[in-house]
């Protein structure tokens, strides 16, 4: 579970909620949100994000 202000990410259910309302995301967008939330404050390049998100599938 990740909570930051009005943002809630249920890591087990793979759901994102903002101000109590579920946000509809593709699997890829969800993975990007999860990556950024779990590494708050870290700057990622496009390549870093791509490698992190797509390496999960392999």
Image: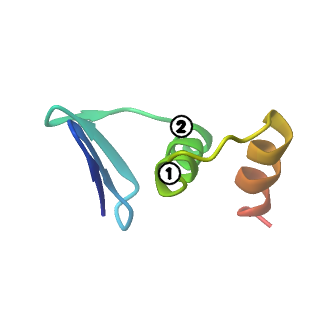
Q: Residue at x 54, y 45 (%)?
A: 41
Q: Which of pointers 2 and 1 indicates the residue nearer the eye?
A: 1
Image check: 37 left or right of 32? Answer: left
Image check: 55 left or right of 20? Answer: right
- Label of residue 34 in the image: 1
The relative height of residue 49 versus residue 11 in the rendered view (above or below) is: above
**Farthest residue toward the left?**
20
The residue labelled by disc 2 is 26
Q: Is mark 2 on a helix, strand or loop?
A: loop
Q: Which residue is drawn at 59% across and 43% down?
A: 32
Image check: 24 left or right of 40? Answer: left
Q: Residue at x 51, y 42 (%)?
A: 33
The relative height of residue 2 versus residue 48 in the rendered view (above or below) is: below
Image check: 58 left or right of 43? Answer: right
Spot occupied by residue 40 in the image (x, y as percentages of width and height)? 50, 49
Q: Earlier in the sequence, mark 2 or mark 1?
A: 2
- Crowd band around label 2 with a 10 angstrom C-alpha radius: few (<14), some (14–19), many (20+): few
- Viewer-proximal residue among 33 and 39: 39
Spot occupied by residue 38 in the image (x, y as percentages of width and height)? 49, 57
The relative height of residue 56 versus residue 21 in the rendered view (above or below) is: below
Q: What element carries label 1?
A: helix
């Amino acid at each position: 579970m990740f909570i930051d202000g009005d943002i809630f990410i249920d890591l087990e259910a793979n759901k994102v909620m903002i101000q109590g309302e579920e946000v509809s995301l593709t699997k890829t967008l969800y993975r990007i949100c999860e990556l950024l939330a779990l590494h708050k404050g870290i700057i990622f390049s496009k390549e870093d994000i791509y490698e992190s998100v797509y390496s999960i599938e392999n």
